Amino acid sequence: MAEKVSDEEAINRQNQWRERIAAHERSGLSVRKFCKEQGIAEHLLFYWRKRLRNRQQPVRFALVEGGTATAGASAEPALELVLNTGERLRIGAEVSGATLRTVLEVLRA
């Protein structure tokens, strides 16, 4: 009998595969070499890449540049948004509320 997968487990699995696919794209390696190094089957990478690509909606965004960061500003983002495409938007503590609202409005559009 097949086990029922909870929504949370399904989302976690999708996020894991989004990250794997993004890691492969960043690596510049062939699918074969990447999968061998990661210990995953090639057909699974192709399967998930196709499955997740079919569910992706176009993401529109605006690049908003503020002033230069202060010398004492931390290199770590104060907030990190992970989009369903696996892309990450890192937002520093010095970003104004108005700028953040603008970015979020564009992402929702």
Image: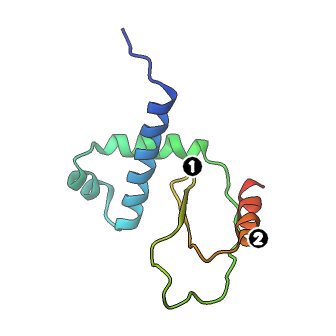
Sequence-wise, the earlier of marks 1 and 2 is 1
Amino acid type, mark 2: Ala
Q: Residues within 10 Å of mark 2 (few under 14, many from 20)?
A: few
Q: Residue at x 39, y 16 (%)?
A: 3
Residue 54, located in which quarter of the rendered image? top right
- The image's mark for residue 74 is none
Farthest front residue?
A: 72
Q: CA distance from mark 1 to mark 2?
A: 24 Å
The extreme top residue here reads: 1
| Nearer to us in this view, 9 or 59 | 9
- Residue 8 rendering spot, x and y as whole percentages: 48, 32
The local secondary structure at tag 1 comes to loop
Where is residue 69? Give x, y as percent: 57, 87
Q: Residues within 10 Å of mark 1 (few under 14, many from 20)?
A: some
x%, y% of residue 106? 75, 62
Q: Amino acid at mark 1?
A: Asn
Give percent across and percent down for residue 7.
51, 28
* Dot 2: element: helix
The residue singled out by tag 2 in the image is 98
Quarter of the rendering occupied by the N terminus? top left
Residue at point 50%, 70% (across, down): 77
Screen quadrant of the C terminus: bottom right
Q: Is residue 68 above or below residue 7?
A: below
Camera-nearest residue between 3 and 29: 3
